[in-house]
Image (spheres, helix red, strand yellow):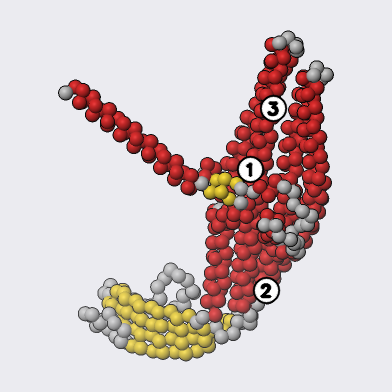
Amino acid sequence: MLENHRAGLRCITITFALLITAGQTILAQSHVEEKKTLTLEEAVDFALKNYPAVRAALERVRAAQAGVGLARTNYLPRADMVWQTNRATDNNITGLLLPQSIIAPISGPVPVSTSNRSAWGSAAGLLFSWEPVDFGYRGAKVDAARATRDQATAEASLTRLDVAVATVNAYLTVLAAEETVNAAEADVERRDTFDKAVRVLVDNQLRAGADASRADAELARARVNLARAQQQEKISWAALADILGLPDASVEVRESSLLRPPADGSPQATPLSNNPIAQVQHARMEEAQAQVHILDRSYYPKFYLQSSVYGRGSGWDPTGKFEGGTAGLGPDRSNWAVGLTVTFPVFDIFGIRSRKAVESANERAEAARYDQALQDLTGQLLKAQASLEGSRRIAENTPVELEAARTTENQERARYQAGLATLVDVSDAQGLLVQAETDDALAQLAVWQNLASVAASHGDLGPFLQFLHDKTQGGP
């Protein structure tokens, strides 16, 4: 009986363990399936579709576009309807009352004596009003709404450019960090192998014990450098994952072509005036111009074609006699009217002139900022082009540096084995080699980085990404 019980427990335990193992396998498989391997172009496209700042900028564009439609509704006529029922006293008085919003007006004759009795009153009406002529005022309002929309569109383009540039920088930083880690791992492996060889020589009393200590120290320093490189790699992964909005564990980069320098050539250039920075400033200038145009169209008469249909009801008869009951609950007198109303704000001229002076100054200020933006973009482009030229020259020489460093390291190790060189000579050669490996990998990435900077100065990464695609696919 006891043996059967133990056998049952063993079966349950084995089954439970198998279930856990199967669950872990399924989770691991799902984790692998969820992992994204992105090229640089795919990473930029993914960020532009998912980064919150881009989505917010696009919503601002939609809001500005709706603002244009709202401005156009000013061309439509107005039709206001009203219905009112009240109960109040009718103690009227002869006299003038200046326009205000506190005291309710009363229509009808003035009674001989006051009374506290109240009666029903009602009113219903429709007022149609249309402004047939506005001397361009509503058109100026629509133009101002369009300028606001254009500014929002330019700002959205600038946001997209910033996100794209940040994605490219983060992607290339990840590649640079990975190459730095690879170089540090290779350095640790070489120094570990050399450390073991030195210990063999020391144990056989062919080298001094100080050589073993120095080799241990060099190996430890290489491991420290590897740990620092791995730390920077994780930080760069976190930065890329933040832009993509994905956990860093679910992203992989695949861009071996970026580890080779591009052939001669550059992406197709676009005019600096097309840069979103310049377009944003130009849109602000146009918005200021639109405000001046609105004020130019403000000091004109206002023409309103109006038509009204209305009815009134009252619990008091025309002589002021109280009728009582439900009299006045519904309109029992109707009227209609058609007319043209003209208003002209005579003394608004002074305020309009002052506001126009303010907006004109704002317009000139925005024009100056636009010129400054073009000047800054020109300087930024020249710097990016100079950096690109320098990075190309560096990338041409780092392979020579790497080959020479490898030869030197091999020779110094051989000379040390033969007793013709010191451990310091070998350590220096190994340090030169890891630096050359790092320099060569980063130099190739620097060329692509500066190509992206030149494209960003023009304000469009599209030609750069197309250039990268052509080079990756072996295009012209």
Q: Is residue 23 left or right of residue 344?
A: left
Q: Quadrant of residue 58?
A: bottom right
Residue 62's x, y, as percent?
Answer: 54, 65
In the rendered view, would you say 267 is above or below 251?
A: below
Q: Earlier in the sequence, mark 3 or mark 2?
A: 3
Look at the numbered discs 1 and 3 and tell me whether their residues touch, using CB distance below 8 Å: no
Residue located farthest toward the left when viewing the structure as drawn: 1
Marks 3/2: CA distance?
Answer: 74 Å
Dot 3 lies on which element? helix
Q: Nearer the viewer, mark 1 or mark 3?
A: 3
Residue 174 shows which numbered tag? 1
Which residue is at a point 40% across and 73% down the rendered structure image?
Answer: 104
Q: Nearer the viewer, residue 289 or 279?
A: 279
Marks 1/2: CA distance?
Answer: 51 Å
- Report if residue 266 is visible in the image: yes
Q: Which residue is mark 3?
A: 190
Q: Earlier in the sequence, mark 1 or mark 2?
A: 1
Q: Which residue is mark 2?
A: 293
